[in-house]
Structure formats: C-alpha cells, structure tokens
Image (cartoon, rainbow, N blue to C red):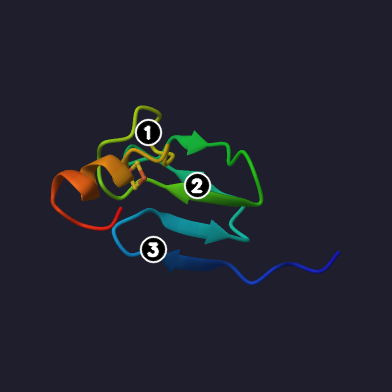
Amino acid sequence: MQHETPTITVCPDGPLLVRGVTELVDADGNRIEPRRRTFALCRCGATGIPPWCDGTHKLVTRARGGDG
Ligand code: FES
C-alpha cells in the first residue's frame, strides 16, 4: 500500500485542511481518531465540534466584515 504524503493547507479565514495524516493527538497527548483521510481542523476557535471545523468560521469572518 502506498502512503500519501501528509499535507496541511491553510485556508484563508478558514480551517487547516489535513490530508494523509493518520495520527492526531490533542494538547495532552490523547489520540484523536481522524474521521476521514482528509479533514478540516478549526483554526478560528468558534467551532461547536472541536477540533473539527463545522463552518462557523464563515459567520466569524462575516461579522468581521470579510467575505466568509
Ligand atoms: S475554522 Fe471553521 S469553524 Fe473554525
């Protein structure tokens, strides 16, 4: 089986899109099971389902006057 090269893409005013990462841990070292091969980590702090992005960043961006 060929392994995908891990990549992290920074989305402007949005999440970190993570591809090819199979191990994810929280600040205490507890393992978090990635739900998919590609997942979005919240970067704005407003998500209701941390550490995952739930799209709330769009509301935050709009509130700041951005495109969201
Ligand atoms: S980055 Fe999407 S909810 Fe925070």
Q: Is residue 7 left or right of residue 66?
A: right
Tell me which numbered mark, 2 or 3, is placed earlier along the sequence.
3
Give the residue at mark 3.
Answer: 11
Judging from the image, what secondary structure is the residue with disc 1 in? loop
Judging from the image, what secondary structure is the residue with disc 3 in? loop
Q: In x, y percent, where is residue 64? A: 13, 50
Disc marking residue 50? 1
- Eye-nearest disc, 2 or 1: 1
Q: In x, y percent, where is residue 29? A: 40, 40
Q: Amino acid under label 2?
A: Leu
Circle 3 crowding by C-alpha within 10 Å: few under 14, some 14–19, many from 20: few
Q: In x, y percent, where is residue 11? A: 39, 63
Q: Amino acid under label 3?
A: Cys
Residue 6: quarter of image: bottom right
Q: Is the distance from the Cβ of mark 3 to the nearest ligand 1 atom less than 8 Å?
A: yes
Give the residue at mark 2.
Answer: 24
Q: In x, y percent, where is residue 50? A: 37, 33
Q: Ligand 1 appears in which quadrant?
A: top left
Q: Is residue 64 left or right of residue 22?
A: left
Q: Amino acid under label 1?
A: Pro
Circle 1 crowding by C-alpha within 10 Å: few under 14, some 14–19, many from 20: few
Residue located at (38% from left, 53% from top) = 15
- Eye-nearest disc, 3 or 1: 3
